[in-house]
């Protein structure tokens, strides 16, 4: 009779590893939760799924929990001396290397209609384990709402 206890053990370990990997989602994941939420005004959204995704560290790591590359520290708007609106977003880099992203701001009037100029992607480098602030100015003096989109450079 052949001893199969070794191969059974290897199969059990393999299944454990594979089940632990199922919590990770690829950047092209079809999981649309979070992507189909209604658009909210005066908000910041990471359009690149991998940039602010949280995942379990999985098998082989000493520490368990959730990790992310960049996080939003704060955001808001304020009037400028010229009567326009300045939008700011403070980002925190949780990695050990500089992170290059692009951000753009879409301004809306009080009825939620796009206003001001067409948004343009601007490059921003968030230093390793540090903070960086993105700023955008409107060209209009009317009261505006905003939505900032952030993505990894080159996406």
Image (cartoon, rainbow, N blue to C red):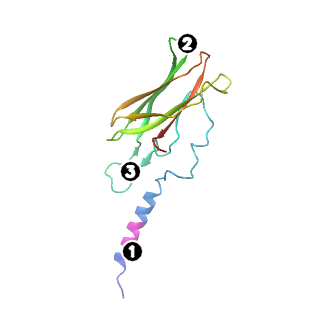
Question: Based on the displayed image, in which of its 4 quarters is residue 123 positioned?
Answer: top left
- The disc placed on residue 125 is none
Crowd class of label 1 (few under 14; some 14 to 19; many from 20; radius 10 Å): few
Residue topped by disc 1:
8
- The nearer-to-camera label among 2 and 3 is 2
| Pointers 3 and 1 in contact (C-beta within 8 Å) | no
Say above or below: 143 vs 58. above
Sequence order check, earlier mark of 2 and 3: 3
SS of the residue under disc 2: loop
Identify the residue at image location x=55%, y=21%.
Answer: 138
Say above or below: 53 vs 20. above
Magenta region, residue range: 8-14
- The disc placed on residue 57 is 3
Say above or below: 16 vs 28. below
- The disc placed on residue 83 is 2
Q: Position of residue 110 (x, y in %)?
A: 65, 22
**In the picture, which quadrant includes the N terminus?**
bottom left
Identify the residue at image location x=42%, y=33%.
Answer: 124
């Amino acid at each position: 009779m052949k001893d199969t206890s070794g191969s059974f053990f290897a199969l059990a370990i393999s299944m454990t590893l594979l089940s632990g990997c199922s919590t990770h989602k690829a950047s092209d994941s079809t999981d649309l939760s979070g992507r189909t939420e209604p658009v909210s005004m005066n908000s910041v959204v990471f359009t690149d799924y991998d940039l602010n995704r949280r995942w379990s560290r999985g098998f082989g790591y000493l520490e368990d929990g959730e990790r992310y590359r960049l996080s939003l520290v704060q955001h808001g708007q304020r009037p400028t001396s010229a009567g326009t609106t300045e939008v700011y977003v403070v980002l925190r880099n949780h990695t050990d290397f500089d992170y290059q992203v692009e951000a753009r701001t879409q301004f809306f009037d009080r009825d939620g209609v796009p206003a001001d100029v067409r948004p343009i992607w601007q490059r921003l480098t968030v230093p390793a384990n540090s903070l960086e602030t993105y700023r955008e100015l409107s060209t209009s003096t009317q009261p505006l709402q905003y939505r900032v989109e952030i993505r990894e450079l080159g996406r």
